[in-house]
Amino acid sequence: MKKQISLEGKRILVTGGATGIGYATAAELRDGGAEVIIASRRAELLEKAASELGVSWMRLDITQEAELPRIVAEMEEKFGPIYGLVNNAGVQNNKDALIYTPEEIQAVFNTNVFGSIALTRVLAKRMIERGKGSIVFIASATVYMGMNRNLPYTGTKAALSGMCRALASELSPHGIRVNSVAPGWIDTDLVKESMARVPERRALVERRSMLGRFGLPQEVGMAVAFLLSDAASYITAAELKVDGGTTVSL
């Protein structure tokens, strides 16, 4: 298994890779031997993160769908063929369900769903030409529970969860596996900000977790690395929960 779990020779793009789960995932992929490219909208954060991690970077706004074919072509020309994609870029907005504006809901879907799928479609076409590839979506444990003040985010992650299986069905004949990881509450800056807006939620999460704690970003990163590796060569259309048992706990 040591050989199969290695990511040597695999070039992997991680969106939203400058912070949080994306940053930790990039670190785990790098440690597994992968050539990692991190991407996001914020060039300054990217450059700093890439320097710390020792990986490559490129500015990428996944909501600019018309630009994606050109940017991906430039990326592969600069760094080489991309074997794996981690769709991690995402935004969140905590408000009561009935007071979101249509524009606020649309903004969350633009990044989390439409942007991620647009980038996936561009890269998948190139993977098909090479006859191999692996794609991982970062979904969410919120898909499996009802949670207040989280309507559009939950909707976007449920959409990705379903689309993952649809894509796996279509792309598997071309040697491309598609899976997702559903993190529970992971101790990132984004989650800390969310908890600050809903302070009572932290104690509730810690009580509900079977392991009695929040997860660590690197624990999600290791799950993603496994799914991208040849050790998961017979796994596709799967969603791996990394949630400390939260979604099935009483």
Image (cartoon, rainbow, N blue to C red):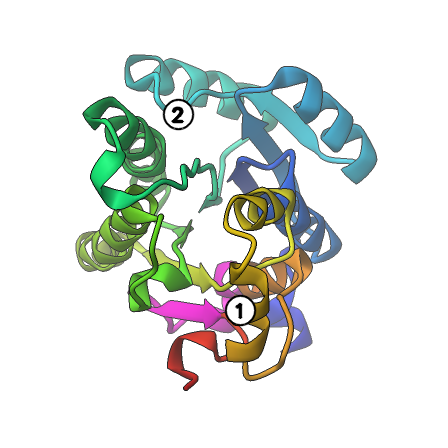
| Magenta-colored span | 227-242
State the mark number for residue 205: 1
Q: Position of residue 103 (x, y in %)?
A: 24, 22
Q: Residues within 10 Å of mark 2 (few under 14, many from 20)?
A: many
Q: Amino acid at mark 2?
A: Ile
Q: How many marks?
A: 2
206 over 222 or under it: above or below: below
Residue, disc 2: 62
* Residue lying at 56% horizontally and 29% vertically, measured from the top left: 39
Which quarter shows the N terminus?
bottom right
Q: Quadrant of residue 162?
A: bottom left
CB atoms of marks 1 and 2 within 8 Å = no
Q: Quadrant of residue 94?
A: top left
Which of the two residues, 66 or 243, is positioned nearer the viewer here?
243
Q: Quadrant of residue 2?
A: bottom right
136 over 152 or under it: above or below: below
